[in-house]
Image (cartoon, rainbow, N blue to C red):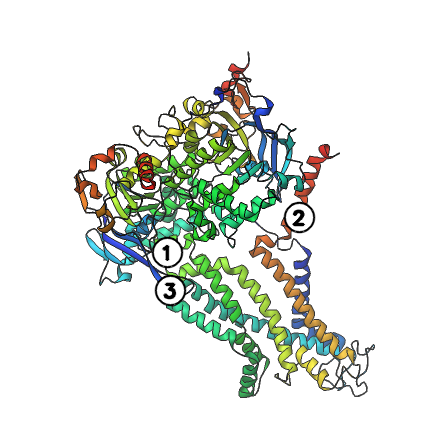
Amino acid sequence: MTMTRTRPGDDTAAATPSEIVLDVDGLSVEYAGAGAPVRACTDVTFQLRRGEILGVVGESGSGKSTLITALTRLQRPPAVTTSGHVVFHPQSGEPGIDLVPLKPRALRALRWTSLSIVLQSAMDALNPVMRLGAQFVDVLRVHDRSMSNAAAWEEARRLLGLVGISADRARSYPHELSGGMRQRATIALALACRPELVVMDEPTTAVDVVMQRQILAQVLRLRREFGFAVVFVTHDLSLLLELADRIAVMYAGRIVELASAEDLYRTPLHPYTRGLRDSFPPLHAPVTRLEGIPGSPPDLRALPAGCPFAPRCPAVMDRCRDILPPLLSHGDPDSPDARSVACHLHDEELIP
Amino acid sequence: MTAPVLEAIDVAKHFAVANSLGDSSVVRAVEGASIRLEPGRITAVVGESGSGKTTLARILARFYEPTSGVIRLDGVPVAGDGIRKRAVQKAYRKDVQLIFQDPFGSLNPLHRVRHNLERAVRLHHHGRSKAALEERVTSLLERVSLTPASDYVDKFPHELSGGQRQRVVIARALAVEPRVLLGDEPISMLDVSIRLEMLNLLDTLRREDGLALLYITHDIASARYLCDDIVVMYAGQMVEAGPKDAVISSPQHPYTKLLVESSPDPHRDVAADRDEIFGAADELGEPPSLIDPPSGCRFHPRCPFAMEKCTTTPPPRAQLGDGRWADCWLHEEGRADELSGSTMTELITRKLTEERR
Amino acid sequence: MKYDLFGNGKVTFGVVVLGFFVLLAILGPWFTSTVLGLDARANDISAISSPPSAAHPLGTTQFGQDVLAQVVEGARGSMFVGFLGAIVGTVISILVGVPAGYFGGTTGNALNFLTNLFLVMPVLPLIFVLAGYLQGTGLVMIAFIIGVFGWAGGARTLRAQAMSVSNRDFVQAMRMLGESNRRLIFTEVMPHLYGWIASMFLGGLIGAVMAEAGLAFLGVSDSSAISWGTMIQAAQQQSAVLRGLWWWFVPPGLCIALVGTAAALINFGVDELANPKLRSGSRRVAKRTAAIRRTALAPEGV
């Protein structure tokens, strides 16, 4: 089976609402700690297309983990969504559902069947005192009450087989599996009810590079089969460049650039994106001295007035220190190749 | 070849572990490892978690006594049979320092930066005057680019960013004026954008102070950026070593090849098809248990080239010139050219489909 | 990072009450004898077992002794035993527990064995045997006995904590620099245990006050000394409960309960200091979060 990389441009029509699986609009999240509230996520807006892999990359304090917990409503106090919408559009064409104000009961109905989550630590997602297969059976039968026990076990074995875990492992306990196998089992578990959207929070950070490659190859194959969309969060841009269709770069709680993986690599528009790209030494190309990005990520409790990246930016201008650049479309906003950036360097191109 | 400052010859470390029933078994964390660190050179040890690379660093830092083998500092044995531990310990600490992986864990949250640096200076240079001590602390902070030093010296660790903390950790290690620095994944817990600065700092220390550096990492691209030589470890053993570019561009051991091909490289031609990059990398296998490692070559259960011999006899070390060697039967058998052909993913998939038939 | 220990009422109340009793123990006897003109040991034959009155605000005992003066005098005895017992117990548990956790190996195992031995020892019978053997059991001796038999639980806690701190990277890093074990224990490990030690000390204080009362009740006490324990014991011997002489045994009992409550309340605060998860502050934050969420959602909800 050969299938070329699905680029947004492959679709003839521009994205219509039915092609959007998740519409995030103006999402802001605050931490209501002891002192003044801290904004960890500010005005995040993006659309996830059906079957797409959207990478979200950022460093510590960029708000990417906050974004994930807000998207999936897994956040706990003191984190709180203060504004914005996260609208999920089911494939069936029913009207979109805003997840932000959704009642817990309605939310539970969506979990697994429409929206599922893979976390960094597989041990957190698997119940240590239950056999692996039994956990699949649990999930399957809760969401499909007509399913018989035997059929559910059969399905559990099939799902484990999809991620290369042999059927006899279904009767193992999680601690009897290696770390890589556990992570694969978690992915299979997340896919048990054929969700339309899977959110993955650093799913391969705890495993080694060879296992990482193995897991990602499986995710890609399963996505071809099932057609789910993925939001893939990581700090490793080099990985996303190989894996994702589009990449959103986060800095200090905001998306600063959103573009296709290829555009982001070849022509990064935001100086931060460029710096991040050049922070990965090449594996094969000639080695030259690289500088990374001087300075450290900002303190969210004391953000500068203008662009939060200004203190570290090599191309900083006067207005950067005073005016926060908004995230604006670059090029034709209706084209599927649309990209956006939040940087004053590109102001002129936007103003006709 | 210059004389090594620090040298480990055929060291091994076994840990006894007891399970809940009280049965004890032996974990062979490191076996038959030899490494030489020369002044002004950086050697990388690359491997996955559980490959024994951290254990090796801790043996060299003398946290662990090696189960067997010899460690020599300036040609004088410091570990091995019949050597008094305490007598050599203090002198050893002055010459060899270890940098931990976690900059958040390796500074006591209750002590200021000053405490850490002053203790380190005092321990090995007694009787300095207050002014001399202050001057030394300032110059150490400047050495790791924490300037102006007065901004940092009275801070607590929680007031510093991850990169600044790791700089303080490095400054503390430098305070004793060591000749060997062992870095146990010193950048893996730092933000991506500041990792390069840390690598550049280590490079400066090597060039300007002639430090001998051991760089332990799982990130082969950063090893290539910083180091001169690379040693690849798998399941507690060293499987290949040599100059970095040679090792990465033409691996001479199947495991090295797998590791290089699996590492993300953002600068590989992005036009390449995503499915081509990941391909059928579904089944690449996993490292074995170190309690009961496979007989013969430890990589043979995963190796697409595996022969009868590989399952029974450990491979001999093939010297390939220019300081390169690899522990693989392919060289003995004259099949080494097969390593430059298809990718490991293809080879493993082909082998698996044949087996299934 | 700073946590306000007095930020909640519990700790403040505990400190005030405990402080009151400490002051009472130090200054009280002087106050009663000079200002009120009462003597804890004097027998007022004109008022035997009399209920509270103007002359004797808390009444008198079977022997015509003033109960208020005895309670004040008894505070000195009980608090003395409490503090000394807690100090002895805490010091022993530090000396045994911290090295046991820090060194591990043979040293650690030996010290751990000692701890376990004291944990499973039948303490009460042993105290009787010891008290009988030592004959004259003054308050100092009682305090020492309580401390010597009561440290094992604390030592176990400290051992576990010291072990976890000692294995952290910063201790390893300082050892790598060549720091001596002594300095590693005192400057790197011990400061992380202060919260535990403080909480153990307060626990020990309650325990010692209660143990003293209990031992006195069972007859192991210094007959010439006055403490809350000896008061209750005397009341019991004269069947005060059956005879309805409540003013004899309620005040000392209440004092013991108050000291215990006060120390426990302070302990809650110290525990919250050592373990942020227990902080009531986080409950406040949770409430606040919920409030912000309600406001944020209000437009949609209405």
Seen at 46% across and 43% down, the residue is A160
The one of C284 and A90 positioned closer to us in this rendering = A90
Q: Please indicate, yes or no, whether residue C227 appears anywhere in the rendered image.
A: no
Q: What's the CA distance linking mark 2 and mark 1? A: 41 Å
- Whether tag 2 and tag 1 are in contact, CB under 8 A, the answer is no
In which chain is the residue bearing label 2? C
Q: Are marks 3 and 1 on the same chain?
A: no
**Residue B206, placed above or below residue B273:** below
| Residue annotated with mark 3 | B23
| Residue annotated with mark 1 | C175
In which chain is the residue bearing label 1? C
In which chain is the residue bearing label 3? B
Residue C124 falls left or right of residue B174: right
| Residue annotated with mark 2 | C284
Disc 1 element: helix
The one of B4 and B300 positioned closer to us in this rendering = B300
Callout 1 crowding tier (Cα within 10 Å): few <14, some 14–19, many ≥20: some
Res. C41 image quadrant = bottom right
Residue B333 falls left or right of residue C126: left
What is the three-letter code of the residue carrying label 1? Arg
What is the three-letter code of the residue carrying label 3? Asp
What is the three-letter code of the residue carrying label 2? Arg
Mark 2 vs mark 3: in front: 3
- Whether tag 3 and tag 1 are in contact, CB under 8 A, the answer is no
